[in-house]
């Protein structure tokens, strides 16, 4: 396992250990927390650090764990102990799994730091700059709450309290949506200032579109279809938001997985889907996400958003919004199958050249199956799995669409041993 994926967890654990010591060692050259959170540029630095933590650690963990547990990928080296547990599934995935600990600890650290930025930004005199910081930090906070809510049946209610109580995952999604609503309301009152946009060193994050896209995502997961539909309709599908990487901070999946061929690789051109819902032979998304190696096994290798150290990873997918809209139309009290099919056709006919992410099935005939609600829901699920391959959402989708348990190796995950040992309120682990 590459060291990069554990840096934030080790940093967090170091902080926790240091907090238990009686002596405090102060670096006279370092800024204090009060200094950092008393000015806009200090808070900007913290916010950028939060995104880096999430994009290196949580993104990496969700991709690894979900891919192996839902059969999107195959394990290459059983010496990668955490990944080997996910590849086996069931009770093999235990409380000591380092990858799970990294997701839990990194997401918790992101939420804690984002809360500090959001609170402190409210006191800034430049309300347009404050709106930007609140929106930016709220994106990573919502993503982090969403990550925990997708993996665990219950999530911490308050981050930063050693013996916090837990709330249900549905309440977790509601908390993520409330965070987004607060940011959107703040920005509506005072739009982002030009100074904030100039100071923002992270290119590629469209704050308002991303907030709406994440609201649509988590409202869908919570079963609030009217809210999800309205938010998805508010997203500009010509825009994209990215987690960017460079030589100093490389794409973690490329660095640890693609470049080494020592962790996992795509299962094959089926992308892990069973008979009946596999990608069509002419689906352009398969060669986007995979590439054939004619020299050495395995034959199928990662491509897509993980084929270079500086390759960007999307925060959301424009076609994810079309599929959310289609699903909401099909699940509402009076389903609108015809409108949903138009949206599905839009995804299937998408030319990669016209997609902001460069993803496209490019199937001219579009959808040719049955037009009843049940069949169209299966088509939505199928396209989510292909369009958003290895995005970390497939396990959530499997539960929501009622896919057979035989298609996945676990339903929810055990709570990390550190949480269980330190918090008596930690819930019981799930059986599967």
Image (spheres, grey):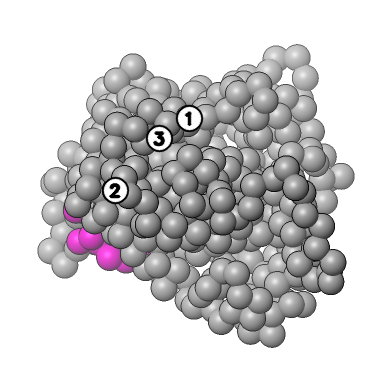
Seen in the image, is 400 located left or right of residue 374? right
Relative to 277, does residue 111 appear above or below in the rendering?
A: below
Residue for badge 1: 201
* Labels 1 and 2: the sequence-earlier one: 2
As drawn, which residue projects farthest toward the top? 295
Check disc 3 and report its element: helix, strand or loop.
Answer: loop
Q: Residue 286's mark?
A: none
Q: Quadrant where the N terminus lies?
A: top right
Residue for badge 3: 205
Residue for badge 2: 127
The question of residue 228 being in magenta is answered with: yes
Image point (23%, 43%), residue name = 191
The magenta stretch spans which residues? 221-230
As drawn, which residue projects farthest toward the front? 28
Image point (48%, 60%), residue name = 115
The answer, for residue 301, to whether it is visible in the render is no
The question of residue 121 being in magenta is answered with: no
User: CB atoms at circles 1 and 3 under 8 Å apart?
Assistant: no
The answer, for residue 293, to whether it is visible in the render is yes
Q: Main secondary structure of the magenta part?
A: helix
Image label count: 3
Q: Residues within 10 Å of mark 3 (few under 14, many from 20)?
A: some
Q: Residues within 10 Å of mark 1 (few under 14, many from 20)?
A: few
Within the image, what quadrant is residue 89 found in? bottom right
Image point (52%, 43%), residue name = 42
Q: Quadrant where the C terminus lies?
A: bottom right
Relative to 363, does residue 271 appear above or below in the rendering?
A: below
Relative to 398, does residue 323 appear above or below in the rendering?
A: above
* Residue 389 in the image, given as x and y percentages of width and height: 50, 39
Check disc 1 and report its element: helix, strand or loop.
Answer: loop
Query: How far separated are the C-alphas under marks 3 and 2?
Result: 20 Å
């Amino acid at each position: 396992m590459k060291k990069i994926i554990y840096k934030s967890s080790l940093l967090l654990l170091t902080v926790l250990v240091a907090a238990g010591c009686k002596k405090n060692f102060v670096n006279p050259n370092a800024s204090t927390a009060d200094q950092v959170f008393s000015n806009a540029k200090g808070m900007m630095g913290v916010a950028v650090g939060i995104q880096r933590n999430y994009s290196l650690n949580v993104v990496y963990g969700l991709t690894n764990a979900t891919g192996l547990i839902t059969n999107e990928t195959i394990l290459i080296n059983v010496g990668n102990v955490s990944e080997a547990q996910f590849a086996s599934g069931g009770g093999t995935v235990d409380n000591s799994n380092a990858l799970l600990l990294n997701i839990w600890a990194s997401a918790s650290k992101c939420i804690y730091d984002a809360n500090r930025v959001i609170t402190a930004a409210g006191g800034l005199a430049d309300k347009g700059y404050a709106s930007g910081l609140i929106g930016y930090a709220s994106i990573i906070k919502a993503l982090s709450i969403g990550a925990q809510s997708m993996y665990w049946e219950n999530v911490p209610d308050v981050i930063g309290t050693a013996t916090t109580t837990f709330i249900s995952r549905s309440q977790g999604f509601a908390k993520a949506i409330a965070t987004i609503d607060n940011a959107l309301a703040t920005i509506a009152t005072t739009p982002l200032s030009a100074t904030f946009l100039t100071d923002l060193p992270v290119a590629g994050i469209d704050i308002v579109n991303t907030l709406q896209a994440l609201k649509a995502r988590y409202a869908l997961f919570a079963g609030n279809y009217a809210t999800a539909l309205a938010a998805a309709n508010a997203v500009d599908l010509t825009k994209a938001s990215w987690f960017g990487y460079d030589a100093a901070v490389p794409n973690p999946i490329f660095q640890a997985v693609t470049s080494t061929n020592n962790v996992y690789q795509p299962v094959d051109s089926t992308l892990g889907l069973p008979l009946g819902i596999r990608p069509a032979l002419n689906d352009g998304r398969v060669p986007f996400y995979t590439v054939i190696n004619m020299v050495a096994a395995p034959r199928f290798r990662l491509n897509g958003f993980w084929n270079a150290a500086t390759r960007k990873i999307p925060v959301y997918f424009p076609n994810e919004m079309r599929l959310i809209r289609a699903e909401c139309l099909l699940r509402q009290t009076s389903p609108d199958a015809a409108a949903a099919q138009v949206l599905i056709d839009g995804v299937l006919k998408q030319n990669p050249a016209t997609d902001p992410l460069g993803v496209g099935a490019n199937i001219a005939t579009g959808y040719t199956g049955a037009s009843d609600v049940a069949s169209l829901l299966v088509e939505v699920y199928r396209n989510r799995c292909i369009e958003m391959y290895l995005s970390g959402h497939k396990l959530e989708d499997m539960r929501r669409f009622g896919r057979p348990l035989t298609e996945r190796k676990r339903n929810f995950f055990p709570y990390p041993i550190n949480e269980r040992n330190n918090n008596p309120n930690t819930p019981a682990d799930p059986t599967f």
